[in-house]
Each structure stands twice: as C-alpha cells, then as structure tokens.
Amino acid sequence: MRCLWTHCLWTRSLTGQLIGFMLLALVLSQGISFIIYWDERGHALREALKEEFLVRSASVARLLETTPRVYHADILHAAGTNYTRFWVTSENSEDIVVWQQEAWRQLKQPLPTHAVHEPVHAAPDTAGRGADGGAHAGGALVGRPAVAAEATSWSPLSAAAWALQRPARYVRLDKAYGSGLTVQLANGQWLNAAFAKPTAGPIWLSQSTVSLAITALLLSLIAVLVARRIARPLRRLAYAAEAFGRGEETAHLPEEGPSDIRRTAEAFNRMQERLRRFVADRTRMLAAIGHDLRTPITSLRLRAEFVSDKEMREKILTTLDEMQMITEATLAFAREDAAGEATRLVDLAALSESLCNDLADLGWDVSFVECDRAPYRCRPAALRRALRNLIENAVRYGTAARVTLLRCADWLEIVVDDSGQGIPDAQLEQVFAPFARLESSRSRATGGVGLGLSIARTMARSHGGDILLSNRPGGGLRAAIRLPQDRTASQQK
C-alpha cells in the first residue's frame, strides 16, 4: 500500500516530484561535499597530529640529553600519554616491521598510576616499559589490532618539520593517524616514539545528520510553496478547460504569475474568445437561414393553391410542409443553442424520472428504473431535450422505452432501451447525420425530419460526453448518453 501511495504521489503530484528532485539533489550534493570535507579533514588532522607528535618528541629528546640518565625512565613515563609512548634502545631497528610490532606493544602497555620519585637504575633498553613496578592504569589501545602501515621503510624528516639538528626518521604507523619516529641522542642511544589514536566515530551520525534533516525539511517546505504557486494556475486552467468543454460559461483566467504560466493563460483566453465567436457566428447564420426560408415557403404555399392538378398540388404542399418542419426544427435548435443556458447542479436520477413520468402521463410506454441520487453539473434543459429525443425514437420505432441510470468509474450513463428490431450495425453512426432517416418516405406519420439524434448528440457532446448506439443481444436498440464524471469541484480546489 505504501509503494502504491508513493507511486501515485510521484506520478500524479507536482509537489511530490519537486520535493523528490530537490531531496535527491540535496543528498547528492551533501554526499559529495561530505566526501570532500572528510578527506580534507582527515588530511588536516593528520598533519596537525603529526606536527604535535614531532614537537613533543623533540622536547623529550632535548630533555633526555640535558638530564642525568638516572631520571630518564621517569621522564619517559611522564612524557607518555594515552596515545603516545616513548622508549629508549641502545641500537636502531632497521627492520620496519619489527619496529612496528614493538611500537604497538608499547602503546598497549598501561601507563603508571603515579609518578616515580626515586631514581630508577634500569637498563636503558627497558626504560618506558613499566620497570618501576608501580600500579598501572588500563591502556587506551588495549585490544586494538595493529593496522598495516602504508609505508614499508623509514622516511627522513625535513628540516622544516624537525626542530633538532640531528636527523630523525619517520614512518606512518597505521592508515589512520598513527605515527612513528626514531632519533639518535647525543649519548648514542636511540629515542623511539609512537603515537596512535583510535579514529573518532563518524560525524555523519550527529551534527551532519541533524543539519541534513533541517535542510531537507526547509527544502521540502520551499518545494511545497513553489509547487503550489505553480500548480494553482494550472488547476485553474484545467478547471476552466473542463468547464468550457462542457459548454459552461467561464470567466477569463487571471493573466498573472511567471511568464510561462501567464502566456498559457493568455493563449487559453484567446482560444476561448475565438471559439465563442465561431459558435455565435454559426448560430446566427443558422437562425438567419431558417428565418429567411419562411418567406419563400409561405410564397410557394400560396402559389401552390392555384395549381389546378389536385394530385400535383398535394405533392407540392407535402414538400412544403416538410421544408416547414425542417425550418422550424432548425430555428428551435438555433434558439436553444443561442440561449446560453446556465450550468447548475441537478440530480440526474430525478431529472430522468421526472421526464419519464411526464411522457408516461401522455400515454407513452415509458418506465424508469429507480436508483440512488446522482448529482451532476449540467444544463438541465438541454440534457432533458436530448433524453426526450432518445425516448421518442425508442417509443416510435421500438414501441416502448426503459430508462436506466448507470454509474462507472469515469462515466455516468443514461441508458434508453427499446423493444424494436434494432439498426444494422453499418448504420449505427449514419443515423446521427443531420436530416438522416432510415425510413425513406419521410412522412410525418413514420418519423420526424431526422434532426432528433443529431441534436441529442450535439447536446451530449456540449457536456463533454457522447451518445452511443448499440444493438442489444436479446433484440432492440440501446441508446446511451455517456457523460464524464463531474470532477470540476476537485479541480477548483
């Protein structure tokens, strides 16, 4: 469920995508910065510890050379720390591996718990190994395994790094901050020094984590604000486009915000104005044609009365009646289209049931299957006329009409089933053409002028839907007004 929610948030939410990309950029930038910082920090820390180790070793060497030998053991013990050990040998160790092993052994030796006040006459090579016999504290490196050194030989120290005149040799004791040093004293003995400090815990888990979390939170808040600023005009545009496609009157979009959003709003407003002018011009032209045809039809009707041949006169009058019907239907359609009915919220179930009851009261065989309420934003008069046309066709050609309201995930369907013979599959779309009739006599007794289905489909499409015809498996024709689910409320938020 979490994966599904995350996928929906990522694929359908601009805010989720913006936050995701910003957090990804943050993690990548912080990771790269941390790697660079950690390397520079390690290098600086090694150099600082090395400098401190060399200064301390030089001080111990000077102290040993300026004090009697009987105090050397005390000096070596006093100079040692939790991470540093000093010891003196009579000979220099050329084998770097053997020297490293001795260095780790010295570092693991515990320090004395008290200073030695009496001179210790110990052999020079045992100084610094606890020869005083005092109690000892636990060594800080007890249990730490030795790490292989990066270097396999001694390296001479430069004059800038080493304060004494006599040369000293230096080696990296481990891959962290460990250092080793050996220098010959004035009396011919060799001072050996070793330093190793356990690596501190990763700082990524402390201050860096808190800093990254705070930064991520701030970026997420900024991303939410930016995404809402971008998404708000896009939602307005989506709502306006949906409402305009359903034939609703929509106000001009505010032409504000970033230049891209502003240009999009301007383009939509221009498109809306052009389409409105086109529809208005078409409607006026249709109304003008229908109005202007009345005069010649009336004139022809008067002249037909003077035709002496009765049969010919009847044929002419029948043709004129048909032309009159087409003209009146065209004018009625033009008037309704130009009226600009307002869109409002109605109950489709109540609207359909009311129409069915009205037609049943007129003696038509019409029934409605009761269902739950179905609130829907539409132009009720236009939708009622489209449904009435379908019911009239069902009663005229199928003897009875059964109306049902169906709900789908994305659609609402008002279904009209009849009990007739249906329509050949090849002509299911043909009947929607204006003035198209499957019955060729074009008599008023067998049908209308062929505008009913065309007007009904125009009404349905003006709501963003359509009318679909299909033959029922058990016989009869099914006509369905399919309307898209009303999501304008959610888009408007």
Image: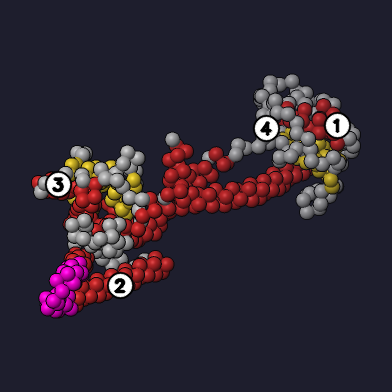
Number of numbered tags placed on the structure image: 4
Left or right, 459 with respect to 165, comes to: left
Q: Nearer the viewer, residue 229 or 148?
A: 229
Q: Amino acid at mark 3?
A: Trp
- Name the residue carrying label 1: 98
Q: Amino acid at mark 1?
A: Val
Q: Is residue 81 above or below residue 433?
A: above
Q: Which portion, as a residue range, is magenta?
A: 295-323
Of the numbered discs 4 and 3, the one sitting upstream in the chain is 4
- Name the residue carrying label 4: 82
The CA distance from mark 2 to mark 4 is 91 Å
Q: Residue at x 49, y 52 (%)?
A: 22
Q: Amino acid at mark 4?
A: Asn
User: Mark 2 or 1, which is nearer the eye?
Assistant: 2
* Label 3 CA crowd tier, 10 Å (few <14, some 14–19, many 20+): some
Q: Report which quarter residue 441 is drawn in.
A: bottom left
The percent position of residue 219, horizontal first and vertical second, equals 45, 52
Q: Residue at x 38, y 50 (%)?
A: 425
The percent position of residue 174, horizontal first and vertical second, equals 75, 37
Helix, strand or loop status at disc 3: loop
Q: Residue at x 53, y 49 (%)?
A: 24
- Name the residue carrying label 2: 278
The CA distance from mark 2 to mark 1 is 98 Å
Q: Nearer the viewer, residue 492 or 284?
A: 284
The CA distance from mark 4 to mark 3 is 106 Å
Helix, strand or loop status at disc 2: helix
Q: Residue at x 46, y 51 (%)?
A: 17
Determine which of the numbered discs, if any, sits on residue 364 in the image.
Answer: 3
Tag 2–tag 3 contact (CB < 8 Å): no
Q: Amino acid at mark 2?
A: Phe
